[in-house]
Image (cartoon, rainbow, N blue to C red):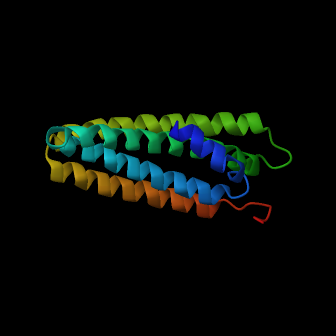
Amino acid sequence: FGKMAFAAKWGRKFDSDAKRWRFRSALMWVGANGLEITTFVAQGQFPVGFIFIVAISVTLKQISILTSSATRGTFYKQFAGNNENLGDITAKGDAQVAVADLIGMVIGIELARLAGSNALAVWSCYVVLSSIDFWLILKSLDMIVFRFLNL
């Protein structure tokens, strides 16, 4: 329901300010991942809080995915320009996302194996990887130049 409410309220603004919404999407994703790690701690100590934290985390992730995918078309349209095939750009972009997700999953599995249940190691991995992810998203948003004004 949170995803639908968010889309109903903010969906019309995604195209007009795609960079800002992609940035917000990254913030929501990082926040949701932090909440997921918090559930590891809350699970045994706060059973009622556990359900609440999981619900907020899942909602944030769904909103982040919605926002990211809704703005992706605007970015792909910029890459395609006037003479390119938007379908080809979209297919290549989605293939890159799939490869990045697979590499990230392999790295994540290995880091989880190394960190085990050590909370400090888990939080350290989260902070380092989230910082790198966020920095790379900011760099990618800097590289994209739109051919229109945000009014």
Left or right? Give the position of 82 relative to 78: right
Residue displayed at 65% across by 43% down: 8
- In the rendered image of this protein, does residue 24 appear above or below residue 115? below
The spot of residue 125 in percent (x, y) is 27, 51
Residue 137 in percent (x, y) is at 52, 56
Count of picture labels: 0
Residue 37 x %, y %: 27, 45
Q: Nearer the viewer, residue 8 or 118?
A: 8
Which of the pair 120/28 is nearer the observer? 28
Which of the 4 quarters of the picture holds residue 47?
A: top left
> Quadrant of the image for the C terminus?
bottom right
User: Is residue 136 shown left or right of residue 75?
Assistant: left
**Residue plotted at (74% across, 60% down):** 146
- Res 107 seen here: no
Above or below: residue 130 compared with residue 50: below
Task: Look at 54% across and 39% down and name the residue there.
Answer: 3
